Image (cartoon, rainbow, N blue to C red):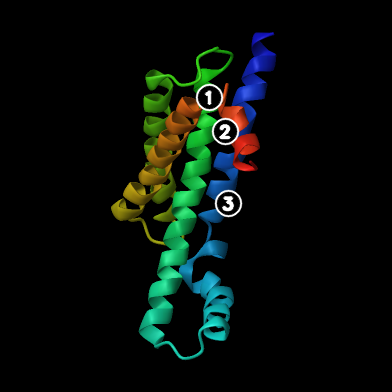
Amino acid sequence: MLSRNIIKYWSPVILWMSVIFWMSTGMFSSENTSHIILPLIDYLFPSISPQTVALIHGLIRKTGHVAEYFILGLFLFRAFRGESLHRWRLRCSIYAIIGVALYALSDEFHQSFVATRSASIVDVGIDSAGGALSQIVILLQGHRGASSVDEIGKDAGR
């Protein structure tokens, strides 16, 4: 039973960490994503300056960081909470935020070895903010009456 619960709660965490690791490769560098994002921005907003296009590209990339680590924060909270009947536990949220921050640090360390990527402490902060934001959403959702973090997705459709 314990091993089944470990698989149930920690498999999504490990899978998502693998996705983040994959997105930290050169394939998702600014240079490579610009081939897709910049023409799209130019198409949608043909009259904006190249500086504004570059700013939007950067904002899209940073929003991706927040989203990746927001999702990791949700998965970590769920894993740390496990079978607990409590909707929200401060300890689980703190562990999730620490886990997000540590993984963000390791992700930036990994990127320091990728030729087309660079490590940035600012990105660690942005990533950690995504994880912290996920915990705020879980807390607020708990106050709304959802019985578990698993119901966040269900409640979003209402």
Residue 91 versus residue 141 in the image, above or below: above
> x, y (%) of residue 59?
41, 66
Amino acid of disc 2: Val
Query: Image point 53% across, 24% down: which residue?
Result: 145
Q: Quadrant of residue 140?
A: top left
| Distance between mark 2 and mark 1 Cα atoms | 25 Å
Nearest-to-viewer mark from 2 and 1: 1
Mark 1: amino acid: Gly
- Secondary structure beneath label 1: loop
Q: Amino acid at mark 3?
A: Trp
Q: Nearer the viewer, residue 109 or 124?
A: 124
- State the residue position of label 3: 22
Which residue is disc 2 drawn over? 13
**Residue 122, position as x, y percentages in the image:** 30, 54
Q: Which is more foreground, mark 3 or mark 1?
A: 1
Q: Residues within 10 Å of mark 2 (few under 14, many from 20)?
A: many
Residue linked to disc 1:
145
Question: Between marks 3 and 1, how big is the CA–CA gap?
Answer: 36 Å
Choose the circle earlier in sequence order: 2 or 3.
Answer: 2
Q: Nearer the viewer, mark 2 or mark 3?
A: 2
Q: Is residue 115 visible?
A: no
